[in-house]
Amino acid sequence: MAVFLSISPMAVAWQLALGGGLTGGVLAEPSGTTNAAGWQFLAQWTRRPRVARRVLIDLSVGQWASVGSGGGFLERSRVVSALLFFEGRLPLTYALRPWWGLGGGLTEARYDLRMRLNGQGYAVGYAPSVTHNDWTVAGTVSLPLDRSWSLALTAATNGPSRFSTVTLTLVWRLL
């Protein structure tokens, strides 16, 4: 007796996508703002669209280096986040129909390899590592390039630590 299991593509309710990209950020400190640049990898699960709406779960990990102004910090940041987005289609033209969405979630950022900078921007000493657990509010636009590839732009702000990021990611849909 043989048993055959067949799953049609339409039966799969969730789709998995993997991606990577570049991150830029701004961190507000009492001594001034800090600019950051780095990378991010992500895994996304999307609920198969119904009537041009979908749910997207975004799990990401990233790292960036930041350089503060005089009196700030030179540091490395490692970030892990879990976000939930509600997205809709934006039908600009027949061929150009990006997804756009709003969402939120939780982010953990660990700042280490921290060096305090004096007023002239020179490193004057090490500072202890710091970890922030924040809530996140984000907006995203995803432009499908074909059936498997898309380009996503995500802007997020986090609190209470007050850092904001903009991420450009190339996403490859597996299923």
Image (cartoon, helix red, strand yellow):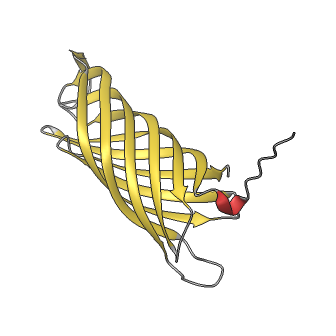
Q: Is residue 45 left or right of residue 134?
A: right
Q: Residue furthest bottom?
A: 93
The residue positioned 59% from the left and 45% from the top of the image is 18
Q: Nearer the viewer, residue 160 or 9?
A: 9
Q: Position of residue 87 (x, y in %)?
A: 44, 67
Q: Pick the residue in front: 152 or 71.
A: 152
Q: Position of residue 115 (x, y in %)?
A: 27, 20
Q: From the top left corner, tell me how far across and down residue 71 is, in percent.
A: 17, 31
Q: Is residue 4 left or right of residue 30?
A: right
**Residue displayed at 41% across by 46% down:** 24
Q: Residue furthest left?
A: 30
Name the residue at 31% across, 27% down: 110
173 displayed left or right of 88: right
Residue 143: x percent and y percent? Answer: 57, 66
Residue shown at 21% from the left, 33% from the top: 70
58, 98: nearer the viewer: 58
* Quadrant placement of the N terminus: top right
Q: Nearer the viewer, residue 57 or 50?
A: 50
Residue 161 figure quarter = top left
Q: Give above or below for 90 relative to 6.
A: below
